[in-house]
Image (cartoon, grey):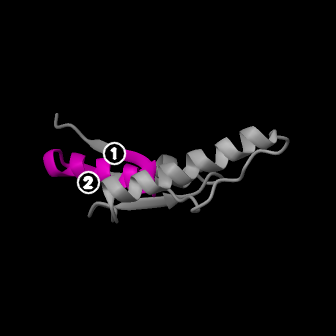
Amino acid sequence: MSERILWLGGNQPRHLYYANKIVETFPMVGGIMQLRGDSIKEPEGLSPVDSANWRQHFEERADAEKKYFGEQKPPDIPILKVDKDTLNDIDAVNF
């Protein structure tokens, strides 16, 4: 029986980078990619210090991803695109 690899990840550069690295060595049968926007909603009720730390963390993470991973495209495999509401739908299960 041959191994079958299904990639599960997001559309962020760090996720696409590792998917592309894996597919260089192992044959992937497909991927399920959760589409996320560029910004993450800050939780309500944070103190001013926590709010500043929240923004700084995600700004620095975005800068680091650009620096270390650059622009990434999904690997050339069949990919089902989902969002947080469709991730567990029957389409994903069947894929």
The one of 61 and 7 positioned closer to us in this rendering: 61
The boundaries of the magenta stretch are: 7-29
Is 19 magenta? The answer is yes
Rounded to the nearest whole Å, what is the CA distance between mark 1 and mark 2? 13 Å
**Which residue is drawn at the image coordinates 57% and 49% (left, top)?**
58
Residue 73's place in the image compared with 14, above or below, is: below
Residue on which disc 2 sits: 20
Residue 68's place in the image compared with 26, above or below, is: below
**Which residue is drawn at the image coordinates 35% and 57% (left, top)?**
67
Q: Secondary structure at mark 2?
A: helix
Answer few, some or many: residues within 10 Å of disc 1's Cα (few below 14, many 20 plus, some between 14 and 19).
some
Q: How many marks?
A: 2
- Tag 1–tag 2 contact (CB < 8 Å): no
**Which residue is drawn at the image coordinates 34% and 65% (left, top)?**
71
Q: Locate residue 40 relative to residue 44 in the image: left or right.
A: left
Q: Locate residue 33 relative to residue 54 in the image: left or right.
A: left
Q: Position of residue 18 (x, y in %)?
A: 30, 47
Q: Amino acid at mark 1?
A: Leu
Residue on which disc 1 sits: 6
Question: N-terminal of the two: label 1 or label 2?
Answer: 1
User: Is residue 88 visible from the viewing direction of this image?
Assistant: no
**Which residue is drawn at the image coordinates 28% and 60% (left, top)?**
75
Q: Locate residue 81 relative to residue 49 in the image: left or right.
A: left
Q: Amino acid at mark 2?
A: Asn
The one of 10 and 2 positioned closer to us in this rendering: 10
